Amino acid sequence: MELLMKKLQDCQARYVIIGGQAMLQQGMPRFTMDWDLFIPAKDPDNFARINLALADELDMELTPLNSKTGEGFVQTFQTSRGLIQFHQAVPGLPRFDLVEARALKADYSGVAVPYLCLEDLLSAKLAAARPKDEEDIIFLKAKKQAMNNRPKKQ
């Protein structure tokens, strides 16, 4: 997947990693089969950059969300590197620009990758309220509490 992340970085695509990969970045050991990317729904230039960068990986073009039908809300692609899902809206998260500004940048095999920050990841998990997220929520709440209990640097 590092090759796909490198391609997205090289084309200056705007995205933030969400879901299981973001949980791994927060320190929650878990198995996940896919990469979930939150992308801005109203950025045609970003769609063009992603489609160009991943043209040899996607069997059809990534398309903007249809605001009338909701079609395209989540688009899933099987690539040679694994499953990738593009989310144009995520329950529990504010608009993309705010999420992007708060994202945690971390190294993934030499690529600076933006991941959801702890607060946004917890908000998304709480909003989804899926049974499979219960352990993630407990972990994130405990991590947030531990961070809040740390002495402040002077």
Image (cartoon, rainbow, N blue to C red):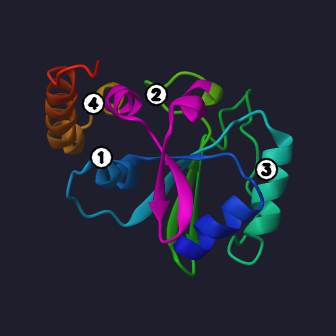
Of label 2 and label 1, which has the lower sequence position?
A: 1
Whether residue 108 appears in magenta in the rendering, the answer is yes
Q: Amino acid at mark 3?
A: Phe
Q: Amino acid at mark 4?
A: Ala
Residue depicted at 21% across the width and 41% down the height: 136
Task: Where is residue 120? Give x, y as percent.
Answer: 41, 29
Q: CA distance from mark 3 to mark 4?
A: 29 Å
Check contact, mark 3 vs mark 4: CB within 8 A.
no
Residues packed near mark 2 inside 10 Å, few (<14), some (14 to 19) or many (20 plus): few
User: Which image quadrant for residue 133?
Assistant: top left
According to the picture, the residue beneath numbered tag 4 turns out to be 129
Of label 1 and label 4, which has the lower sequence position?
A: 1
Task: Where is residue 77? Give x, y as percent.
Answer: 59, 65
Numbered disc in front, either 3 or 4: 3
- The tag on residue 26 is 1
Q: Is residue 54 found left or right of 131 in the rendered image?
A: right
Give the magenta range: 98-124
Q: Pick the quarter of the image with the C terminus.
A: top left
Check contact, mark 1 vs mark 4: CB within 8 A.
no
Numbered disc in front, either 1 or 4: 1
Of label 2 and label 3, which has the lower sequence position?
A: 3
